[in-house]
Amino acid sequence: MKLSSRAHYAIKTVLELSTHADEPVTLAHLAQAQNISISYLEQIFALLRKCDIVKSARGPGGGYMLNKPLTDISIAAIVKAVDKATVKETSMEPEFNKSDSHTLWLSLLELIGGYLDSISLAELHSIYKTPEATNKD
Amino acid sequence: MKLSSRAHYAIKTVLELSTHADEPVTLAHLAQAQNISISYLEQIFALLRKCDIVKSARGPGGGYMLNKPLTDISIAAIVKAVDKATVKETSMEPEFNKSDSHTLWLSLLELIGGYLDSISLAELHSIYKTPEATNKD
DNA sequence: GTTAATTCTAAGTGAATTACTCGGGTATAG
DNA sequence: CTATACCCGAGTAATTCACTTAGAATTAAC
């Protein structure tokens, strides 16, 4: 029940991408800004790209861009994208006895997932920018 | 960003406890119901007890009881209680560069944490019981 | 068409975490 | 005293995490 490091960097770099409009930003630039290795970021961006959150341009002058407006990117989308990495389709949860516990679990996961779905990055960004007055708008 | 197995069993067993009013329920009983080992459940209940979610009675005829009404137990409380297990006070998150990223992260964690705090087990239980009409009331 | 800049991909690694088990000890009702 | 229960600390195999390493593929610029 905590956010992974991958998710952290994913959110931060996507936020950074949003400040560059439509010009590609290189991984080298983003990696330096976050003070992590390019290789590690590559891994993260591969996942973000698979989920159509970002798009890429190869070769010199290339880099990454957002694939949709910030308001259309939920926190859940990003977290799911990067956590998908190590998922092995066979086991989402440990296999509990298949009684009604299943139903309970689905209810809980939907509650949480649904909530995260409702927070777009744009919202988070505005909270971020005005920390002492988070819920004015 | 997923729930641990410990958290799952904690929630399920606490829910079960609530159906037994004020009579102690043994770990043996709970363990059998969830089809896990007593030793494992012991570990979980030690944590729940430390956080005053349950209370215990030793000796024959003993067992565990809820320490407060279901409506006063939030999902967050349970999850935090059992996840606290492996926390080493030194590192909550990987140490990112201490710029404003800190602020961003706090905002996000508060959003999520605050939400979980707002869901009591009683609520979850009622959702559980009426799966096809979750948000009436 | 070579070079340099960039994305892409797969695989490996050490440390931490998870999901348990094992082997006891301690309180207490009968 | 003995059986029933909670209590506690350590151990362990498997998995996951947070990265690194090594190199292949694409493409703009010369």
Image (cartoon, coloured by chain):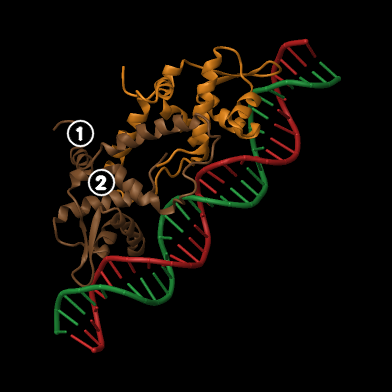
Chain colours: A brown, B orange, C red, D green
* In the rendered image, the vertical position of residue A115 relative to residue B19, given as above or below: below
Q: Quadrant of the N terminus of chain B?
A: top left
User: Which residue was labeled with disc 2?
Assistant: B100
Q: Is residue B82 in sight in this rendering?
A: no
D29 up-or-down from A84: above or below? below
Vertical relation: B1 (above or below) A29: above
- Foreground: B34 or A21? B34
The percent coordinates of residue B36 (x first, y second) are 61, 34
Instruction: Point out which mark residue B127 bears.
Output: none
Residue A84 pos. (x, y %): 39, 50
Instruction: List the single residue furthest toward the front.
Output: B132
In the picture, measured across the screen, residue A40 lies left or right of residue C7, that is right
The percent position of residue B66, horizontal first and vertical second, equals: 53, 18
Q: Are marks 1 and 2 in contact (CB under 8 Å)?
A: no
The reply to whether label 1 and label 2 mark residues of one chain is no
Tell me the quarter of the picture where residue B55 sits.
top right
Q: Chain of mark 2?
A: B
What's the CA distance linking mark 1 and mark 2? 14 Å
* Secondary-structure class at tag 1: loop
Chain ID, mark 1:
A
- Which residue is depicted at the point 52% across and 23% down? B14
Q: Amino acid at mark 1?
A: Glu
Task: Indicate left or right for A134 with C25 as reference.
Answer: left
Q: Determine whether the residue tagged by mark 2 lies in a helix, strand or loop.
A: loop
The residue depicted at 67 percent of the width and 19 percent of the height is B58
Residue identifier under label 1: A132
Disc 2 residue type? Asp
Residue B70 in the image: state x and y as whole percent. 45, 18
